[in-house]
Amino acid sequence: MLSFTSPHALSDSFPVNDLPPSLLKTSSSLRWELTRIALAYDVPLHDLASSLPVRDDGYDALWPQMVETAGRLRREHVALASKKFVPPLQTRNNAWTAADESPNVIRTGKLCFRSKGSPLAFKLLLSPLKLEVKSCRFARRSGAHRFLYLTIPSLQNAKLPDYLSGQTTNLRQRLQQWLLVPEKQLMGYSWTVFCTRAAKTTKKANKRGDAEDFGGYMVVLFATKGYGLQAVEVGDILNWFMPLHLNLESPVCKAFARIDLGITMTEILRYALLADFLRFLEDLPYHCIQA
């Protein structure tokens, strides 16, 4: 039976800070790789991390060790040994090298539907670290490692797997309740919802009608605290980007549009503008916009 009884049911899809103490103080990029490998292979994160030698031999040496260990742990699990499995992709070296310093290395993942017979409806999968040409203003301010872009599948009945047919309302309620949980634990960080936006649909996803990629939306999570992080509240970073006391009279739609602009990937400005080139305009009152 699917786990719809608890408002925290989706939290079971997250491996809650299950890293050995020896690895909690390692780089965020290493914790990311360990977590995504454990999730992909469906093996306990603690078992995977504990089975690896704690030394820095470089990513080219670390990757095969993680994959080999995760594969062995999966084969030892009788219930998983016979299930179909798609191995995760390897992170490129340029992304791995820049991961802990560059605001251009993004961290993405998705909630996908589990196979029939699982007590949980969703499975969390993390993608390889990716080095982008552009970055967003929030990442340049607080660090890209604080942001997780999580794609949520469409919950429309027409796009649900057959075994979830008729569960749209339950799925939506549990997802909404999970989004409201103030602290979601992952990789030694406490995450909270920063904003949501419609997920981009690729032409490939449209053609194959993939329920996990088509018609969903994206949730941006922000790490407020954790190992190696200075505690920062969502309100603090929003106030830096968009001083709240100056925007109290702004329409809600305009506020959300500005936040969306802040997480949009842009290039760093290469031109210096003098103050005389700028002209500040006051926001129009809401009733004027309506008129």
Image (cartoon, rainbow, N blue to C red):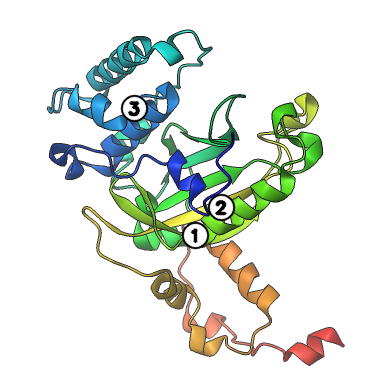
Q: Which residue is mark 1?
A: 193
Question: Of the numbered discs in the image, which one, if any, rests on residue 135?
Answer: none
Residue farthest right in this picture: 291
* Disc 2 crowd, CA 10 A, few/some/many (<14, 14-19, 20+): many
SS category of the residue bearing label 3: helix
Cβ–Cβ under 8 Å for marks 1 and 2: yes
Q: Residue at x 28, y 38 (%)?
A: 31
In the image, taking residue 211 as reference, residue 174 lies left or right, namely left
Can you give x and y, in whole percent of width and height, for residue 284 in the image? Answer: 72, 89
The residue under label 3 is 93
Residue type, mark 3 in image: Asn
Task: Residue 217: give x, y in percent of width and height.
Answer: 65, 48
Element under disc 1: strand
Which quadrant of the structure image shows residue 153? Answer: top right
Q: Which residue does the image show at 69% across and 82% down from the upper left? A: 251
Of 51 and 57, nearer the camera is: 51
Residue 93: image quadrant is: top left
Disc 1 vs disc 3: Cβ atoms closer than 8 Å? no
Of helix, strand and loop, which one carries label 2?
strand
Q: Is residue 260 above or below residue 184?
A: below
The tag on residue 219 is 2
Question: At 56% across and 48% down in the image, what residue appears?
Answer: 5
Separation (CA) of disc 1 from disc 2: 7 Å
